[in-house]
Amino acid sequence: MNIILYGINNCDSVKKARQWLAAQAIEHQFIDFKKQAPDENLIRQWLEQIELAQVLNKRSSTWRGLSIEEQAQAETTSGAIALMMQYPNLIKRPLLQHAGGIALGFDAALYTQLFCE
């Protein structure tokens, strides 16, 4: 099973997810958005499995720092994708890509259900 965890290294939720995966000896690849921003194709793949409103984190400080004009771009899928490519911190973290789909945020109970049952 190819497991990829996306996020930023200093995010508390990402740290918890990485620690949980390591404690369970679950092999995974970690991709830091600050070192490797997602491209349009990858974001579109995510959006085939999960709604844009769940992926785009409008509660983030990055979102609040955007101008009104930039925030308005998120009204269309292509505009939201462009924003997430430019500002990867707008993507809900961590984003876990696994054989069964996508999981957003860290939830130990969900991770247990996905990998330990």
Image (cartoon, grey):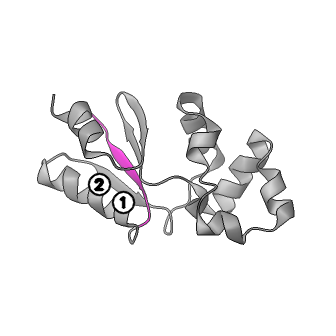
Q: Is residue 72 left or right of residue 107?
A: right
Q: Which mark is residue 17?
A: 2
Residues tagged 1 and 2 counted as in contact (Cβ below 8 A): yes
Q: Is residue 92 left or right of residue 11?
A: right
Element carrying mark 1: helix
Q: Is residue 108 left or right of residue 86?
A: left
Question: Residue 31's image quarter?
Answer: bottom left
Residue at point 57%, 45% (across, down) = 55
Residue 2: x %, y % from top left: 31, 38
Element carrying mark 2: helix
Q: Which mark is residue 22?
A: none
Residue at point 65%, 46% (across, down) = 40
Query: Magenta part of the protein: which range?
Result: 1-8
Q: How many residues crowd mark 1 within 10 Å: few (<14), some (14–19), many (20+)? A: some
Q: Is residue 105 magenta?
A: no
Residue 9: x %, y % from top left: 38, 68
Is residue 79 positioned above or below 112 on the image? below
Residue under numbered circle 1: 13
Residue 44: x %, y % from top left: 62, 38
